[in-house]
Image (cartoon, grey):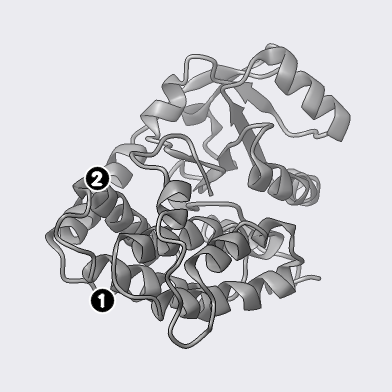
Amino acid sequence: MVRVARAFCLAIVCLSFAGTWAQSSGMSARQISERIGTLRQMEDSDRAKATRDLALAIRALPDGVEKLGLAASLANLSTEGDFGHENLQEVGTTLALAVQSAPKETDHRMVEEVCTELAQLAKYEGLKIDLKLPAFTQAKADLEATDEARAKVDFTLKDLDGRSWTLSELKGKVVVVNFWATWCPPCRKEMPDLEALYAEFKSEGLVILAVSDEPRATVEKFVAANMYSFPVLLDSDRKVGGAFKVSSIPKSFVYDRQGKLVAQSMDMRTRHQFLTLLAKAGIHEKGGNIQKRP
């Protein structure tokens, strides 16, 4: 997940006490931080195991702000695809334990952001989060209110060809509204799957609206180079992103044929994960089964 804005810098937190050693893994905090920094360069199969190992190594560190920063950094990367629900649960458990045991003097903004992350992991990724903090209770309530507001959003934006698209006028279609940027690695990683799904299900009424707030020339160059055919919309004043309360990208919202918001993601999705979201809107692979493909 690529953050648009944060109240603190996790990288500084992660390296601030580099002499600490994990009690069971033998990995120092610095080694853990460096390993987290290599995750995006790994093959997905290797990344899955590394994610779990890092979650357990962080859990073995002494309680403190450093442990919380490392756990948050790992969680920030662990939803960029499908690395296994059990592995993601380990990440969520580590983050919950780290914030539960964080020192009282920990920056309240950091605690609030971590609790928001955990609330999203529980709601959108189906994790079991056992956390008894007022900030977590508030984060869950805030997320429910945010989703209620998102469900009411309507917008009109123009695509790169100058055509206007209005969300409320697309009833009868299954619509994916995807927020992305050319500079965002997980955005770029999921776009080929979006293109393949668009080609496969366009005839069944699938519409993908990819929304970017970047300059037209930047977006046009990227789209032309990759030959993406789904509509790419320009949100230069970020009003639509603001209406959806998008604070990180990529993020996708899925609407059924009645125009109801039925699913959303908190981060990058694989083909299989997109198919799971689309199934909630009534689009399935032929045969009615969603199969995970290599």
> Where 177 falls versus 290 (above or below)?
above
Tell me the quadrant of the picture where the C terminus can be found: bottom right
- View extreme (front): residue: 19
Callouts 2 and 1 close, C-beta under 8 Å: no
How packed mark 2 is, by other alpha carbons closer than 10 Å (few <14, some 14-19, many 20 or more), is few
Tell me which amino acid carries mark 1.
Answer: Asp
Mark whose residue sits in front, 2 or 1: 2
Q: Which residue sits at x=44%, y=47%?
A: 12
Left or right, residue 10 beside residue 106: right
Q: Secondary structure at mark 2?
A: helix
Q: Quadrant of residue 228?
A: top right
Q: Between marks 2 and 1, how big is the CA–CA gap?
A: 20 Å
Q: Foreground: 200 or 253?
A: 253
Q: Nearer the viewer, residue 100 or 29?
A: 29
Please tell me whether residue 70 is drawn above or below residue 92 in the rendered image. above
In x, y percent, where is residue 186?
A: 65, 48
Residue at the bottom extreme, as displayed: 24
> Residue 174, relative to residue 37: is it above or below?
above
Residue 196 horizontal/vertical position (percent): 79, 50
Does dot 1 land on a helix, a strand or a loop? loop
Q: Residue at x 52, y 60 (%)?
A: 280
Q: Position of residue 217 (x, y in %)?
A: 74, 13
Q: In this view of the protein, can residue 161 be seen by the observer?
A: no
Q: Which residue is mark 2?
A: 109
Residue 94, picture quadrant: bottom left
Query: Looking at the image, is mark 2 or mark 1 earlier in the sequence?
Result: 2
Q: Residue at x 40, y 70 (%)?
A: 92
- The residue indicated by pointer 1 is 130
